[in-house]
Amino acid sequence: MELKLRPGMTATERIRVERDRTITFMGEGAQVYSTPSMVSDVEYACLRLIQKYLDEAHSSVGIHVSIEHLAATPMGCEVEVEVKISEVDGRRIILDAEVRDAVEVVGRGQHQRYVIDVARRTWRIEEKRKLIESRV
């Protein structure tokens, strides 16, 4: 399988910060975009960028995430998640990410993904499930 992915490829997604993407531990007035949601949004933006260039038999899985959450974004506002492929090393893809709201950069970092054969990975997961169940 030859990957069609190249450094410099980008994607941008706009996401509204709804209640399910916010922290709740500081009370109603302080609900802001949560770090776990930011990490998830970056990861899925990277997945969607890569998936556009893969056939149905292949996908990618995350293998490393390093994200700095730099500023708060209030619930109800939008963020823009921009991801860019910075390196392709065989099946390992490294992407840079930047998350902005209407005022400032609220997050940035890097995410690594690995291109997989879906059928092979599914088989390996099932084999592991059987091994775990045999030990219980």
Image (cartoon, helix red, strand yellow):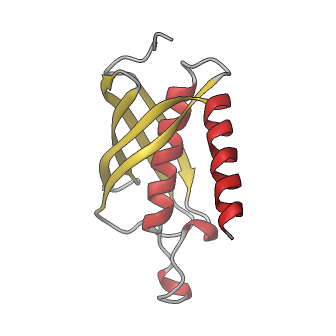
Q: Quadrant of the C terminus?
A: bottom right
**Among the 4 quarters of the image, the one containing residue 95:** top left
Camera-nearest residue between 8 and 3: 3
**Among the 4 quarters of the image, the one containing residue 132:** bottom right
> Horizontally, is 96 left or right of 60 in the view?
left
Question: So how many labels did they put on this image?
Answer: 0
Residue, x 47% and y 72% (percent of image)?
32
- In this view, 14 is above or below 1: below
Residue 59 on image: x %, y % = 58, 30
Residue, x 44% and y 56% (percent of image)?
39
- In this view, 47 is above or below 5: below
Residue 36 on image: x %, y % = 47, 65
- In this view, 21 is above or below 99: below
Residue, x 61% and y 64% (percent of image)?
18
Residue 55 on image: x %, y % = 63, 17
- In this view, 24 is above or below 71: below
